[in-house]
Image (cartoon, rainbow, N blue to C red):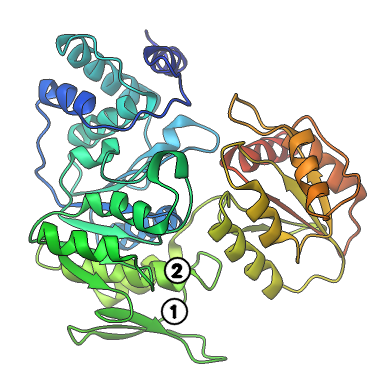
């Protein structure tokens, strides 16, 4: 295998469930990790949570990069290219470097007995090989699903961050916040800080913090933020006595202050190994970028891209849209996976969307446009919504029908946003 395309096809074929397969557990990944001889030699921050993981990672990467550190960042899923998942020094990994890492993992996998790694497990091990080869100064790992049994958890976090805890991936993590909180708490390590940004953490998380001996830092108690009406600055504070007046993050949305506060608390608790100045923080907040999260593209008509795919994220998106002035209608390019809470997402967005354009996404997990239309009808949102075979086609229809004062929002899945981004690239 000589090309990235061939390697990704190989990863998809390894596990019986293919690229979309989810099989939680650390036995497989640890066996191959041992064959690779991977060691942790630099500070590691692991970020879990239902929503806000990607934003928190982006903020940490930006601040630490501004401070002069060579940052290795691993996130998932990607939008357009697999290379987006592995960033080194602020740039996506090159094909050649990624292929070399895949080859190393494959050799180790064979030595471990040809273990059938999942797509995500193989990629996680390869990301670490990329970071080791590049000799990064610090690593940031975003948990893929849950925490306790996620492949990322085969690495020991020097500082763990848990953003929010809400209902998502219930088939794998449990149907309650208590069950999900227990899974996410699995990234905690004894005597090491864990930052919890959820304002109302479930009791299971608090119990696990005590049981594990982790140093829990709770939002609203050990750290927090505030912002007075009409004040362009916001305030970060911590129980350690830190008080900072800061410019808002470049990432859009009022909820980003909670993510920024969690990132700053993590850095404060890692200050013995990661030194950052006030100027690093200010510039890092201002320069953070993340495609597909309240990602506004000016029109007319204006376009907002957001990967919101669960009820909590949909409520945040709806609130953000409600805070943005719009003289006309809001057209929704709407595609989701079948295993998500489609009804709750529709309910959250119903107050701000006036025209729904349900579409079919690629892959076996996707809900069809007809299924989404049925859900819209069942909830009295739309009597007979027009359906589309792809998000790109729905987006083209929205652009053709929307007036100058209208806006378009594409949401419901990473796949929805990715298809619209490809359509934008084709029209550029």
Estimate the x, y position of residue 419 in percent, counting from the top left: 66, 36
Residue 190 vs residue 381: left or right?
left
Residue 305 seen anywhere in this rendered image of the structure: no
Residue 31 vs residue 218: left or right?
left
**Residue 286: numbered disc:** 2
Which one is nearer the viewer's eye here, 346 or 303? 346
Residue 253 vs residue 141: left or right?
right
Q: Say which residue appears at 45% left-offset and 14% top-offset.
A: 9
Estimate the x, y position of residue 189 in percent, counting from the top left: 13, 54
Q: Say which residue appears at 80% left-offset and 48% top-offset.
A: 378
**Residue 247: numbered disc:** 1
Q: Say which residue appears at 55% left-offset and 34% top-offset.
A: 80
Estimate the x, y position of residue 59 in percent, counting from the top left: 38, 61
Residue 383 vs residue 9: left or right?
right
Q: Say which residue appears at 55% left-offset and 69% top-offset.
A: 253
Residue 399 seen anywhere in this rendered image of the structure: yes
**Residues at marks 1 and 2 touching, judged by CB atoms closer than 8 Å:** yes
SS at mark 2? helix
SS at mark 1? loop
């Amino acid at each position: 295998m000589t090309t990235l395309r061939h390697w990704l096809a190989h990863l998809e074929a390894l596990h019986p469930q293919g690229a979309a397969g989810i099989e939680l557990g650390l036995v497989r990944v640890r066996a191959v990790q041992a064959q690779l001889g991977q060691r942790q030699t630099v500070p590691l921050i692991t970020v879990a949570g239902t929503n806000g993981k990607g934003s928190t990672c982006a903020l940490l990467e930006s601040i630490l990069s501004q401070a002069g550190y060579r940052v290795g960042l691993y996130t998932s899923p990607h939008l357009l290219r697999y290379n987006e998942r592995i960033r080194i020094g602020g740039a996506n990994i090159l094909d050649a470097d990624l292929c070399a890492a895949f080859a190393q993992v494959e050799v180790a996998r064979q030595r471990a007995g040809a273990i059938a790694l999942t797509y995500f497990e193989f990629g996680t091990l390869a990301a670490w090989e990329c970071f080791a080869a590049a000799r990064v100064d610090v690593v940031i790992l975003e948990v893929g699903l849950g925490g306790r049994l996620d492949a990322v958890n085969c690495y020991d976090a020097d500082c763990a961050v848990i953003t929010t805890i809400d209902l998502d991936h219930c088939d794998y993590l449990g149907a309650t916040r208590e069950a999900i909180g227990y899974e996410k708490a699995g990234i905690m390590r004894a005597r090491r800080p864990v930052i919890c940004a959820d304002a109302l953490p479930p009791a299971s998380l608090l119990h696990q913090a005590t049981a594990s001996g982790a140093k829990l830092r709770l939002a609203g108690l050990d750290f927090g933020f505030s912002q007075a009406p009409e004040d362009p600055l916001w305030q970060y504070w911590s129980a350690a006595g830190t008080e900072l007046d800061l410019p808002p993050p470049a990432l859009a949305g009022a909820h980003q202050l909670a993510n920024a506060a969690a990132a700053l608390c993590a850095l404060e608790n890692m200050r013995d190994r990661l030194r950052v100045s006030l100027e690093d923080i200010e510039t890092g907040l201002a320069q953070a970028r993340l495609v597909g999260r309240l990602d506004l593209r000016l029109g007319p008509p204006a376009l907002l891209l957001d990967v919101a795919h669960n009820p909590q994220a949909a409520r945040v998106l709806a609130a953000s849209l409600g805070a943005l002035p719009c003289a006309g209608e809001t057209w929704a390019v709407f595609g989701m996976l079948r295993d998500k809470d489609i009804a709750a997402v529709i309910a959250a967005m119903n107050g701000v969307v006036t025209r729904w354009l349900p579409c079919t996404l690629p892959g076996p997990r996707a809900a069809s446009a007809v299924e989404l239309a049925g859900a819209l009808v069942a909830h009295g949102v739309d009597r007979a919504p027009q359906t589309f075979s792809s998000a790109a086609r729905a987006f083209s229809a929205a652009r053709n029908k929307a007036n100058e004062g209208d806006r378009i929002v594409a949401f419901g899945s990473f796949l929805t946003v990715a298809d619209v981004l490809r359509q934008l690239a084709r029209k550029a």
